[in-house]
Structure formats: C-alpha cells, structure tokens
Image: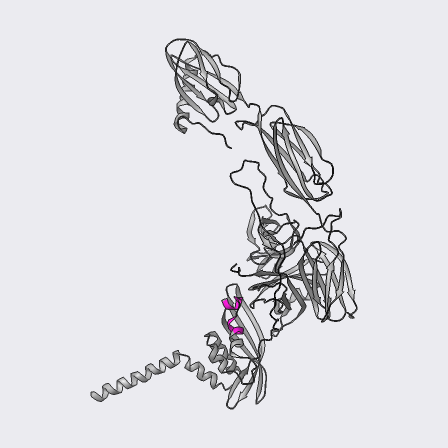
C-alpha cells in the first residue's frame, strides 16, 4: 500500500511535467529543432510565429540568416501601428519547389487575419540542412534607412464652419461638394453582379463620399441596395477621381433591368497631406501564378502612414472600367521609404486589361499635438 | 427671431369646444356680427355687438384661439396681439343665442426678407448657375402675398455691379443669373424698401484648361515634373489643394503621383529608368505629354 502510493505520486508527477512541457511548446520546439524535412522546418517556424514565440522562432533559424531578433520580430509582429500589429497568422501552406541533400526551396503562403480581412503573403523560402535537422534561412527585410531629417509639411488643410443653428430660416450655409459619377459599368461575375466605375469630386473643396447603387427589376421595384463600403476612396480632394466597386452577391444579371446610382457627398475637414507616390507598377504573375498588379508606395510626406489601402481601376481598350480591386498594405509607410504592394486581378480581367490606375487610401494616427 | 405663439387654452379640447360652438351658432340662425372684412395683422380693431348683459366671445384664428367675457351693447375691442397671424378668423359671440362672423387678416408691411442664394460656390462662366430667391414677410413673419418688387443688387469682386428688380408672386421673388468670368466673392443683396438681406456666393475656377507641364532632370535618375500655373479657360487660377495626377511610364513600369497644387503649381518627383513618357491630368482634363529619351 505504501509503495503503491509512492508509485502513484511519482507517475502523476511525471505526467504533469509532461503535460506542462507540451503546453509550454516543448513539442513544437522539439519538432522545430528536430525537423527532418524542409517542409517540417517551415511549418514548425510558422507554428512558433502563430504562437507569438518570436524568440524561439528566431532561435530556430539557420545561422546564415542575416536578420536579427529585433528585425525578425518587427517583421512578423509589425510596428508603427501598421496593419500587421492588428493581425495574426491564421494559416501557412507550404509546398516544395526544389530540394537536394543540403538545400531546399519551399513556397510559403502565409494567410494573416486582420481587422480588415485576410491578407496573403507568398514568398519562396530557402531551407538548409544543419546536421540532422533542417533550418529556415530568413532574409532581413530590406528597408532603406532614411537619414534623420526635418521634413516640412505645409500642404493645405480645409476646415468647415457650418451654419449657426440659431439663425433664421434662409440664413446662408455652405453647400455640399459637387461630385459626379463619371463612369458606371455593370458586369456579371460568378455568383454576383458587380457595379463599378469612377467618381470625381468636381468641386474646389474636399468631399466625404459614398456611392450607393440600387438594382431594379423590369417593373421598377428594387432588388437590392448596396454601398461601395471600402472599395472607394471616401475622402476626395478637389478634382480627385476615385474608382468604386459595389458587389451584389447572390444576384443574377438577367434579373436586373436597370441600376439607380446615388453619390452622396459631405463637406468635411481634410488635409492635402500626405502625398503617396505609387511607383514601378507592373502587372505580373505572383508565386501562385495569379495575376497581380504590384508596385511600391512611397510616402512623400514627413508623417508616417500607419495603414495604407491600394485601390486599382482597370480599363479595357475602349477606356471602360472593367474591374476594381484593392489590397491593404500591412507595413506602415514611413517617410520616403518604398513599401511593396500587390493586388489581385482576376485572370479573365488580366487578359482584357489595357490600362490601369492606382490610388492610395491612407490612415494615420493623430499626433499628440 | 421667431414669432411667439399665444395659445390660451389647449389643443384638441379647445378645437372641439369651438367646433361645437360653430355648429350651435349655425343651428341657432344667429344674427351677423358687424366685423371688418379685412384686417391688417397686428392692428387692433373693434366690432359692434348689440344687446345687453354679458356674453362669451370666442376668437378662432389660424394659430390662436381666445375666450373672454364681454359686455354687450358697445364696441368690443380685439387687441393687436390677437391677430398677429395672417389668415381666416372666426368670431363667435355667445349670449342668447350665439352669433358668429368671419374676417380675413392680411400681412402687414414687409419687414423681413428670407433670402436664399444657391449655390454657395459656383464655377465661373456658367449659365443660369446662381439662383436667388427672396420671401417677403411682415414683422410677424406672415408671408406678404400682396404684390411688391424686390431689388436684387449684384456686386462681383471685379467688374461692374448691376441690379434687377423682380416683382413678387405669392410673396416670392426669384431670379437666375450667370456666373461671371472672374473668380472671387459675389455679393448679392435683396432689397425691399428699408429691408435688406445680403448673401455671398463664391465664384471659383472651372475645369483646368491648357494644362501644361515641364520635366526638370534631377540627381539619381530622378526627374522633377512641374506644371505651369494651372488655370481655367477664363484665366483663373485653380485653387491650391486641387489634385493634379502625374503618370510616368518607363521600362520599370508605371508610376503615378497625385499631388495637390501649391501656390498655383503642382510639382512631383519621379524616378526614371531609361526612356520614359510622362503625362499630366487634372480631374478629367488631360495635359501635355513629355517624352524623355533616357539621357537626364
């Protein structure tokens, strides 16, 4: 009886220690440091990143990786209130591209879930054999360092003084900005009808804009009403043109007789800063053989842009807008530092594509003063 | 300043009572009261009521009802405060039996103008783009339906002003005007007698016209593109903050910069790789094209 109790306590202790080891990531760590295939090495690294164990993930990298812990953590966890700081790694798909005895290349597709939807990050990762295990070679994110400097920001800012509510009927007020839908195109996509086009702020003041569309049946009754949500640049400066796209999921084109468009503009305070240049735009194929429009964003002002959204309008030979797509950039745009972006283009659209235009929506945290 | 409303006894109950009185007086076949056919708003007047003893006077107006005890056999005074609102009134005098009469209260002399000037911003040289509408009210804010003439005096920022007299119709005078060729504030004043109301419409530059730019080579394969002063077809400068789009196409792809006009000029810096073509646009207006042969 006495021995039985002792054996029971010892066994229970061993079990509890084992459970604690597993719970603290020991199993993953073991797998990471004993990865027997390149895919296992990458999967283990992704598991650590998913668990926010950046230190252990960094420790598992191959020694030839030219990154450091701070850079690696900044790249994976995000910085400067970028979208990556509001994201977490949802899944990672790994597929082998090439392998020999000592080296391998695997295609890694990381899917990050963020406050603004999921974001894909596809890259080809080098993996090296280190004795009996495989380790990932992680390159340092190459971002040019701008020298410390003072950048003057003296772009216009508009403020609005509205009518005093106590004034008489007929007292003068400032009118809402005049905006115009310059083009509208209704197209049928699998499982939905899409309304897209462009809208211009024709006024000399900034506008906060919403474009809504109502699909109508032959008898004039509405089928459905939808807004452009985030597939538009809501704040338009004078003479600025924004693409818009409105999706009607579950609606068939043959049920639609006509479309009623409604562009509503409000007069809002706004700033002409920052100016974001979009450079080196090209339509190409990404690692997964999808058509993408890629390029670089350069924040030309002196203030960081925390979250940027790329909106792209695509035109056919006749200049008609045939598609509008968007993509969020999960890095903050620091002044003068180019940041790459890529937005998807459906393959059938890419085949008819003749021209395109990119604009950038931005969100910046308010400064404290 | 809003007109004060005097409600002596409340809502539905009062209306119900008055309705009953109307029916009662009609059924009784009472003699007519001697009241003036029309009365000017805010002016006291009297009516004569024959008989003796006391009676109850009910006064029912468009926004006002009053009840008081009066002595018959003399003139009954209706105070000015009882007839502020223009419209049809009914007087009911209930002694034995009830009698009633109706009269009309018309607006007094014009004392206020409600002046609408739309829009608050208008592009230059646009036909029928300014709409000026004046509503004529008396001191109690009754719409003055009598015929009068409102004088619209227009003073542009530059050039000679003018005025146009417009007769009112049902208390409203309205004109439409073209915007002039020059940007700046246009003061429009509606005048009726001693009453004036002033408004301002801002004339702003129209679409860009003859948009031109030049490219200046810079260091490290960059080129600075800069527009000439951006003006509309009437020569007015487009306001600062207006967005101008530069697009450059070279072997590295396409680059675009949407930059606002600053001090009349839009400027941007672009990286150029070899031969390049640069175009400029402002809204839906395209400008000139610059071709670079790759030697900066």
- Does the segment drawn in magenta span residue A84? yes
Residue at 47 percent across and 29 percent down: it is B4
- The image shows residue B201 at horizontal and vertical percentages of 65, 41
How many discs mark residues in the rendered view?
Answer: 0
- The image shows residue A125 at horizontal and vertical percentages of 57, 80
Q: State the residue in front, A109 or B284.
A: B284
Q: Can residue B230 be seen in this view?
A: yes
Quadrant position of the N terminus of chain A in the picture:
bottom left
- Does the segment drawn in magenta span residue B110? no
Q: Can residue A210 be seen in this view?
A: no
Q: Quadrant of residue A3?
A: bottom left
Q: In which quarter of the image is residue A331?
A: bottom right
Q: State the residue in front, A315 or A331.
A: A331
When the figure is inspected, residue B50 is found, relative to residue A117, above or below; the finding is above
Left or right placement of residue B23 versus residue A116 in this view? left
Q: Give the range drawn in magenta.
A: A74-85
Q: State the residue in front, A205 or B219.
A: B219
Image coloring type = one colour
Left or right placement of residue A5 versus residue A356 in this view? left
- The image shows residue A83 at horizontal and vertical percentages of 53, 66
Q: State the residue in front, A4 or A235.
A: A235
Q: In which quarter of the image is residue A110?
A: bottom right
- The image shows residue A25 at horizontal and vertical percentages of 42, 79
When the figure is inspected, residue A74 is found, relative to residue A131, above or below; the finding is above
For the view shown, which residue lies furthest in the left direction? A1
Residue at 55 percent across and 42 percent down: it is A163
When the figure is inspected, residue B128 is found, relative to residue B226, above or below; the finding is above
């Amino acid at each position: 009886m006495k021995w039985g109790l002792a054996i029971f306590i010892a066994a229970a202790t061993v079990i509890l220690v084992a459970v604690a080891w597993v719970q603290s990531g020991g199993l993953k760590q073991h797998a990471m440091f004993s990865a027997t295939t390149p895919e296992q090495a990458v999967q283990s690294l992704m598991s650590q990143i998913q668990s926010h164990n950046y230190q252990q993930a960094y420790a598992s990298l191959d020694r030839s990786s030219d990154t450091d812990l701070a850079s690696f953590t900044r790249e994976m966890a995000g910085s400067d209130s970028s979208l990556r700081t509001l994201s977490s790694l949802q899944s990672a798909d790994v597929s082998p591209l090439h392998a020999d005895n000592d080296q391998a290349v695997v295609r890694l597709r990381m899917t990050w879930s963020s406050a603004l939807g999921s974001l894909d990050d596809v890259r080809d990762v080098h993996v090296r054999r280190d004795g009996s295990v495989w380790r990932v070679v992680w390159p340092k994110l190459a971002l040019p360092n701008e020298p410390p400097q003072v950048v003057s920001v003296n772009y216009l800012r508009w403020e609005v003084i509205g009518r005093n509510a106590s004034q008489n009927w007929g007292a003068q007020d400032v009118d809402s900005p005049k905006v115009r839908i310059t083009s509208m195109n209704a197209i049928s996509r699998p499982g939905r009808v899409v309304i897209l086009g462009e809208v211009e702020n024709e006024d000399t003041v900034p506008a906060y804009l919403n474009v809504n569309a109502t699909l109508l049946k032959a008898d004039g009754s509405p089928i459905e009403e939808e807004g452009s949500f985030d597939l538009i640049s809501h704040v338009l400066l004078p003479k600025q043109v924004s693409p818009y796209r409105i999706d009607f999921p579950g609606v068939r084109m043959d049920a639609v007789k006509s479309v009623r468009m409604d562009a509503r503009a409000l007069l809002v305070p706004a700033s002409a800063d920052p100016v974001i240049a979009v450079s080196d735009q090209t339509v190409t194929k990404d690692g997964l053989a999808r058509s993408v429009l890629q390029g670089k964003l350069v924040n030309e002002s002196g203030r960081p842009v925390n979250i940027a959204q790329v909106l792209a309008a695509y035109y056919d030979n006749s200049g008609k807008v045939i598609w509008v797509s968007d993509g969020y950039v999960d890095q903050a745009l620091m002044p003068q530092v180019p940041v790459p972006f890529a937005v998807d283009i459906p393959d059938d659209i890419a085949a008819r594509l003749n021209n395109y235009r990119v604009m950038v929506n931005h969100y910046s945290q308010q400064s404290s003063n | 300043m809003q007109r004060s409303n005097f409600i002596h006894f409340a809502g539905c109950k009062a209306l119900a009572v008055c309705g009953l009185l109307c029916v009662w007086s009609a059924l009784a076949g009472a003699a007519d009261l001697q009241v003036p056919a029309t009365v000017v708003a805010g002016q006291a007047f009297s009516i004569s009521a024959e008989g003796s003893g006391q009676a109850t006077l009910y006064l029912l107006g468009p926004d006002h009802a009053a009840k008081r005890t009066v002595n018959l056999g003399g003139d009954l005074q209706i105070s000015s405060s009882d007839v502020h609102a223009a419209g049809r009134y009914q007087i009911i005098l209930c002694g034995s039996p009830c009698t009633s009469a109706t009269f009309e209260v018309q607006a007094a002399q014009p004392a206020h103008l409600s002046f609408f000037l739309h829009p608050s911003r208008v592009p230059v040289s646009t036909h029928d783009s300014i709409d000026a509408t004046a509503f004529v009210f008396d001191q109690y804010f009754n719409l003055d339906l009598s015929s009068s003439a409102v004088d619209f005096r227009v003073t542009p920022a530059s050039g000679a002003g003018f005025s146009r007299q417009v007769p009112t119709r049902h208390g409203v005078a309205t004109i439409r005007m073209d915007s002039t060729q020059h940007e700046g504030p246009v003061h429009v004043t509606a005048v009726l007698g001693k009453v004036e109301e002033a408004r301002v419409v801002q004339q702003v530059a129209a679409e860009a016209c003859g948009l031109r730019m030049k490219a200046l080579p810079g260091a490290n394969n960059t080129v600075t593109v800069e527009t000439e002063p951006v003006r509309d077809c009437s020569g007015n400068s487009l306001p600062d903050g207006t967005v101008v789009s530069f697009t450059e196409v070279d072997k590295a792809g396409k680059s675009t910069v949407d930059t606002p006009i600053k001090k009349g000029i839009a400027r941007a810096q672009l990286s150029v790789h070899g031969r390049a073509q640069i175009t400029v646009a402002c809204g839906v207006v395209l400008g000139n094209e610059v071709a670079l042969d790759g030697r900066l």
